[in-house]
Image (cartoon, rainbow, N blue to C red):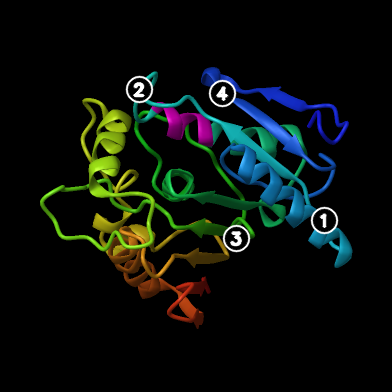
Amino acid sequence: MQSRGAVPQTIELEYGAKGHWIGNKNARGFCLPANVGYFKFWESLIQCSSAAGKDLAVFAVAYTLAPNAQYPTQLIQSVEGLRYILTETNRTPANILLGGDSAGGNLAIGVLSHLSSPHEAIAKLDVQEPLAGTVLIAPWTSLEVSTDTKMNCLGDVITPDVAKPWSQAYLGRAKHDYYTDASTAPSSWFKNLKNQQILVLAGQNEIMLPSIRHFVDKVKVRATLVCCQDELTGAVWLSFY
């Protein structure tokens, strides 16, 4: 923000989280979570949207990192970010896109799950209509990581030796469930998702690709597969009708 001569627009959220606005906060949009590289990416999205005559803003939730807090704290904070957007900015669900990369993708799916199947430890969030969509970039759909399992690590900066302690730090003493491990949920879990469309992106050489594909197969049971675009990017677009 300093390099661009911009004033930070930060919001204090419930349960110790913060939210950062990127772009005109009176525009329409929602995104998780925060990192310098992501801020540059979001800025490019805003610029491209503006060039196309579209109005877009990004709201990034800076959730508490593990091991300073464990699950479900981060999911609670993410839900509160969406609650803020819905209750304090006068936006309708149809004007909101939810999104996340890797661990952020895990939280985005968790938020969607909470909307249709409320988590017992999180205050219920009612939405009167489906969200416009959800973008999942290399989402972490299963926290079950074994260093003994053969996984394709060529071209991926994350290895089982890295992913396993991260997932353990996040879960703490909590047990795996459908909010943390969407790939393990039955297809019926996704039956009533409050969401119009989902875009899933995965790299060909990342270790999470098998679990991501498993997740997509589960969700496809109640969705129309609109686009499956190519082996390199692994882009899948799901629409719900």
The answer for how far apart the CA atoms under marks 3 and 2 are is: 30 Å
Q: Which residue is mark 3?
A: 133
Please state which amino acid type lies under the numbered disc 2: Pro
The answer for how far apart the CA atoms under marks 3 and 4 are is: 23 Å
Q: Secondary structure at mark 1?
A: helix
**In the image: residue 145, left or right of residue 90:** left
The answer for how far apart the CA atoms under marks 4 and 1 are is: 27 Å
Q: Which residue is mark 4?
A: 17
Circle nearer the viewer, 4 or 1: 1
Badge 3 or badge 2: first in the primary sequence: 2
Tell me the quarter of the image containing the N terminus.
top right
Circle nearer the viewer, 3 or 2: 2
Residue 6 place in picture, x, y as percent: 86, 31
Please state which amino acid type lies under the numbered disc 1: Gln
Badge 1 or badge 3: first in the primary sequence: 1
Q: Which residue is mark 2?
A: 67
The span shown in magenta is: 73-78
Q: Quadrant of residue 25?
A: top right
Examine the residues drawn in magenta and state their main secondary structure.
helix
Please state which amino acid type lies under the numbered disc 3: Gly
Circle nearer the viewer, 3 or 4: 4
Kindly tell me whether residue 92 is visible in this rendering: no
The answer for how far apart the CA atoms under marks 2 and 1 are is: 35 Å
Tell me the number on the disc at residue 47. Answer: 1
Q: Secondary structure at mark 2?
A: loop
Q: Residues within 10 Å of mark 1 (few under 14, many from 20)?
A: some
Give me the residue at 52% from left, 19% from top: 15
Q: Secondary structure at mark 4?
A: loop
206 magenta-colored: no
In front: 171, or 206?
206
